[in-house]
Structure formats: structure tokens, C-alpha cells
Image: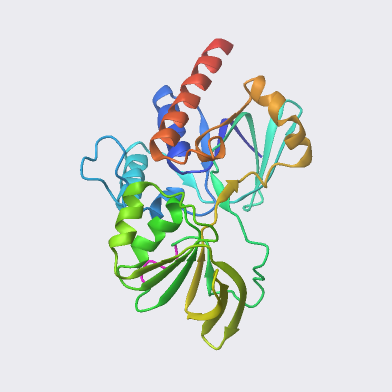
């Protein structure tokens, strides 16, 4: 059993900002991250609106800087998945994949979001063909890619993959939720085709290809593709909270024992600047609370 004053779950921009600020205050904490430092920001084609980068910066380079800043500040992120979190005997109890039990007085959830899965997708036979982010697709080339979705993430993914591949964006309505700069770049890109008012009806795997049946206003046709990338939206990631903690979550937030920051708190405003500022605010609030205990 390991005790810490604060446990932070998630090492994206929000969780890292919490850690950096807590380090400045000399407060005891631990950070858990189940996948990779930086979270989804690694997938960004270009971050244009973060202060200090007048020409923008791509996600991979931004994550390198985050890792460098953690190293300079001697902050170690534990790459472990959190299996379950409980609140018992006035302590947060966190079980991880290293079979260790961690206890803390305060908990910060900065786990961001997870992808929504369309109900018509049966994943059993599609492993290796259907993806929800770019982690395993960055080096792919000369492939036919179908992207499901029409928001910022879908258009951003399309721009990244179009550098070495042919991309089709499928939008079930005629409303595009992506920001104008992304729309303009997609419209100018010869390697990207955009279909609106188009439904994905069926997917069949045949050898090393996917045959996708789509329905437009005018007809039904089949597309032969190599990869399906689903980007139809995301929802908050808190699967690790047990039933008791889910029930008491709001009360613990009011009592300033449980804190949420970044995309998990602001799922409709997924911006690096919001997540980073939110993380710093949470750490400063925790510092004030802990100083008041002494």
C-alpha cells in the first residue's frame, strides 16, 4: 500500500499542468497514465491557437515538449491503467494494473474522453482494420481510408492521413461541425473526398480489404477501403469509478475532495489552452486547501 497526498489520473495537458503546479508547491502526488503521455494531442495535425507558438505546432512536437518539461522538473508519470477507484474510510483507494493499492486524501481526474462507437459496427472480425485515433496509422501510406464523422477531429485526422493516403470523409448529415480553417484546408486537398447525407450501412471484411456499403440520397454503393477511422464524437472517460463513488461523486466535488479538469470536465470545449489552464487552477486550489490544513 502506497499513500500520497494527491492522486492524478491522466497525463494529457490537464494532468500535466496539475503535476507541474503541484511540484512547484512541493506537494506530494503521483500521476497515472494508461496509454501515453500527452493524450490525444499527439494526433493533432496543427495546434494553431496555443499562445507562444505563432506559427503553430503539430501534436507530436508538442508532446515532446511536454515530456521534456516533465523530465526537467523530475516528474515521473506511472504508465499504469487504473482499474478501480473507491472512496472509503475518508480516503481515495486506487487499484492499478501493477496490483498495488494507492491511497490519497484528494483525487484529480484528468482522463479526458473516449470514442463513441456506432451501434452498427461489430468489431469481432474487424480488428486491425477499424481505428479510433491515429496512434497506429501515422506511418501508413498508399492506403484508402474512410473517416466516419464531420467534426474537428475527423477533419484534422483527414488532413494528417492525406499526406500519404487517399481519404474519404463520410458525414451522415449536411452539417459540418469542424472549424472553418479545417474545412477550407480539406476542401483544397486533392487527396480528400467529402460525402454528406451519407450513411454507412454495412461493413464486410474480404481478405485484406473492407467492403463498405454506403447509402446516399440517390443510391447505394460499395467502397473498397483499407482502413476505417471512426471519429463521430467522444464521451467522458470515467469507467474506473465504482458504483459507490459514481453515486457520491458530486458530493465529493462540493466538499473539495474530488476534482475534475480538462476534457473530462469540459467535453464540449476540447482545447489545449482550456485543459492546461484548468489543470493549473485545480492545483492552485488544492494548494490553498492543503495549506489551510496546517
Q: Nearer the viewer, residue 205 or 7?
A: 205
Instruction: Name the image quarter holding the N terminus.
Output: top right
Q: How is the image coloured?
A: rainbow
> To which quarter of the image does residue 70 belong?
top left
Q: Is residue 220 above or below residue 187?
A: below
Considering every residue shown, the one lying at the far front of the view is 218
x, y percentage for residue 208?
51, 85
x, y percentage for residue 40?
45, 51
Q: Nearer the viewer, residue 209 or 30?
A: 209
71 horizontally vs 14: left or right: left
- Asked whether residue 71 is drawn in magenta, I would say no
Task: Name the residue rendered at 74%, 42% in the picture.
Answer: 242
Task: Name the residue rendered at 30%, 68% in the picture.
Answer: 163
x, y percentage for residue 259?
58, 29
Task: Name the residue rendered at 46%, 41% in the picture.
Answer: 270
> To which quarter of the image does residue 256 belong?
top right
Q: Nearer the viewer, residue 187 or 207?
A: 187
Residue 45 appearing in the image: no
223 horizontally vs 190: left or right: right
Task: Name the residue rendered at 56%, 50% in the picture.
Answer: 234
Residue 21 appearing in the image: yes
Considering every residue shown, the one lying at the far bottom of the view is 207
Count of numbered labels shown in the rendering = 0
x, y percentage for residue 162?
34, 68
Instruction: Name the image quarter holding the C terminus.
Output: top right
Residue span colored magenta: 135-139
Chief SS of the magenta region: loop
Amino acid at each position: 500500500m502506497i499513500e500520497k497526498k494527491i492522486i492524478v489520473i491522466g497525463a494529457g495537458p490537464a494532468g500535466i499542468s496539475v503535476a507541474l503546479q503541484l511540484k512547484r508547491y512541493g506537494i506530494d502526488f503521483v500521476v497515472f497514465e494508461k496509454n501515453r503521455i500527452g493524450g490525444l494531442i499527439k494526433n493533432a495535425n496543427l495546434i494553431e491557437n496555443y499562445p507562444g507558438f505563432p506559427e503553430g505546432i503539430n501534436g507530436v512536437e508538442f508532446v515532446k515538449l511536454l515530456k521534456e518539461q516533465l523530465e526537467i522538473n523530475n516528474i515521473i508519470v506511472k504508465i499504469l491503467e487504473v482499474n478501480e477507484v473507491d472512496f472509503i474510510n475518508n480516503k481515495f483507494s486506487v487499484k492499478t494494473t501493477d496490483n498495488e493499492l494507492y491511497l490519497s486524501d484528494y483525487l484529480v481526474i484528468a482522463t479526458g474522453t473516449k470514442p463513441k462507437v456506432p451501434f452498427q459496427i461489430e468489431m469481432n472480425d474487424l480488428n486491425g482494420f477499424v481505428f479510433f485515433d491515429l496512434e497506429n496509422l501515422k506511418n501508413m501510406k498508399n492506403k484508402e481510408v474512410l473517416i466516419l464523422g464531420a467534426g474537428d477531429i475527423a477533419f484534422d485526422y483527414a488532413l494528417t492521413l492525406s499526406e500519404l493516403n487517399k481519404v474519404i470523409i463520410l458525414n451522415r448529415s449536411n452539417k459540418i461541425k469542424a472549424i472553418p480553417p479545417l474545412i477550407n484546408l480539406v476542401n483544397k486537398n486533392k487527396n480528400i473526398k467529402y460525402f454528406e447525407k451519407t450513411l454507412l450501412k454495412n461493413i464486410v471484411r474480404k481478405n485484406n480489404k473492407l467492403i463498405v456499403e454506403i447509402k446516399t440520397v440517390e443510391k447505394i454503393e460499395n467502397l473498397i477501403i483499407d482502413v476505417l477511422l471512426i471519429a463521430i464524437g467522444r464521451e467522458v472517460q470515467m469507467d474506473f469509478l465504482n458504483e459507490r463513488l459514481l453515486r457520491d461523486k458530486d458530493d465529493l466535488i462540493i466538499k473539495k475532495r474530488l476534482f475534475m479538469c480538462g476534457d473530462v470536465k469540459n467535453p464540449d470545449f476540447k482545447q489545449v489552452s482550456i485543459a492546461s489552464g484548468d489543470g493549473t487552477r485545480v492545483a492552485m486550489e488544492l494548494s490553498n486547501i492543503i495549506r489551510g490544513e496546517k
